[in-house]
Image: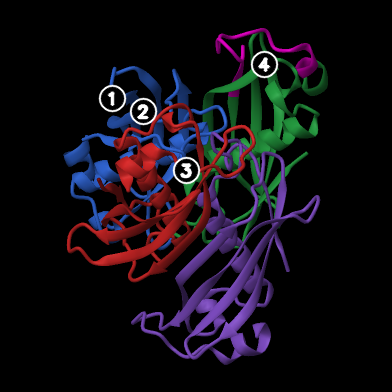
Chain colours: A purple, B blue, C green, D red
Amino acid sequence: MATVHRIRYSDADPQGIAFNGNYTRYWDDALTDWLWDAGFTGEHLGVGAEMVTAHIEIDFRSSARLGDVIVTEPSVERIGNTSMTVALRTTRQSDGELIAEGREVIVFVDPETFRPVPVPEEIRTRLG
Amino acid sequence: MATVHRIRYSDADPQGIAFNGNYTRYWDDALTDWLWDAGFTGEHLGVGAEMVTAHIEIDFRSSARLGDVIVTEPSVERIGNTSMTVALRTTRQSDGELIAEGREVIVFVDPETFRPVPVPEEIRTRLG
Amino acid sequence: MATVHRIRYSDADPQGIAFNGNYTRYWDDALTDWLWDAGFTGEHLGVGAEMVTAHIEIDFRSSARLGDVIVTEPSVERIGNTSMTVALRTTRQSDGELIAEGREVIVFVDPETFRPVPVPEEIRTRLG
Amino acid sequence: MATVHRIRYSDADPQGIAFNGNYTRYWDDALTDWLWDAGFTGEHLGVGAEMVTAHIEIDFRSSARLGDVIVTEPSVERIGNTSMTVALRTTRQSDGELIAEGREVIVFVDPETFRPVPVPEEIRTRLG
């Protein structure tokens, strides 16, 4: 499962490249597609928990220019007690060049109290 | 009541001006500030109705460049049975030059059914 | 030529629907794809002119929810001396329901002076 | 120097809080204000170099809700040969609660070749 974005005027900054601040959006879109694709949809993802992003880190290796199509792929790096670390890589589709890489830490929380809860078993099974 | 935005790299496109597609965000921000400022906050704006944007029209008269501070001012143009037309004007703060003007039509709806409801009396009184 | 957007968390507002202020971005993306697809790419679109958005109007007919895939299609409505009016329609892919429709007026300008210039002949021929 | 953002509908996601992917935009806005305020404006910041974001890391400590005003403050953490590390903290204005903290690594590059160049002396003097 990979998510594709095409860099258009709405994405590009005065340097003519995808604005650095857009990548967290591209990554959240990719995480969403990845979860939906694994069947985690609807209220509380169907597992009785909400997900909260606790940490994001991005290393920019290159940049994407107007017209470039970029591909973002999430993969599980680690599943802990109440959190999951997901690695993310964004590459240029045409030549495979690495544009950005890093990770996000996602914490599972109770939908009412927003307190951490154990990672749902279905998440471990289907993504882990 | 007026809402201010400063044009930074996150706003500017490769032409070095505020991306045209951002103005609907600036205007929605201004409408939100304007409503909040008039006391319409919290669940269902405190009047038992939700607002839905039905129509937007924008005429661009000039453009805002990096570093410009722009000011958006909403004002009621007309209040109908179930809708309100709000005029919007965005000017450059430094010299008052008109950047964009137009209007939005907002429909009041039932929070459950999303069907149109009469414009709440408080809206007529406090904004009209 | 049509441009597709999937509504994810980055697109949705607290009502759970695509934020109204995003549609101008979706439409600009669609206009860009449409122009690129017709061969108008690179510096000054390869025709010695820049395009400036002069007018946008949107009528919202329905709304797009989380997970919806929406399709935007531009088509020429009118080509004048120095401007072009493009009609835009956004529909839900799954059932074809109309979400938003309207138009944008685009003015062709000199890249140096930003003064209006005649619509380039290639635009008339390939899009008109 | 601090940069203020008010969380409105355009910022909030279906959970009713500022979308996590917006913080890189808030931080870039804050970095821009901070540089402009220190006199680094105009072409190549007036120092013959462009800045490129090489690394971003964010720890989310709390969340900002609709109507919250958040304040972001950058401060130099370290200046190296060709890069500068800037710490960033975002707090809620009303009660000072920490919402997000982290850092960005900015590399100075030649405007033509985009190759790293030494951190301009004015940057060391005025920000360091």
Same chain under badges 1 and 4? The reply is no
**Which quarter of the figure is the C terminus of chain C placed in?**
top right
The answer to whether any part of residue C58 appears in the image is: yes
> Which residue does the numbered mark 2 point to in the structure image?
B68
Q: Amino acid at mark 1?
A: Gln
Q: Chain of mark 2?
A: B
Q: Chain of mark 1?
A: B
Judged by depth in the image, the label closer to the viewer, 1 or 2, is 2
* Residue for point 57% across, 36% down: D110
As drawn, the label of residue C49 is 4
Secondary structure category for the residue under label 4: loop
> Which residue does the numbered mark 1 point to in the structure image?
B93
Q: Amino acid at mark 4?
A: Ala
Residue neighbourhood size for the residue with mark 1, other residues' Cα within 10 Å, grouped as few (<14), some (14–19), many (≥20): some
Q: CA distance from mark 2 to mark 4?
A: 25 Å
* Residue for point 41% across, 37% down: B8
Sequence-earlier tag: 4 or 3: 3
As drawn, the label of residue C21 is 3
Sequence-earlier tag: 1 or 2: 2
**Which quarter of the figure is the N terminus of chain C placed in?**
top right
Same chain under badges 4 and 3? The reply is yes
- In magenta, the rendered stretch is C105-124
Residue neighbourhood size for the residue with mark 2, other residues' Cα within 10 Å, grouped as few (<14), some (14–19), many (≥20): some
Residue C107: quadrant of the picture: top right
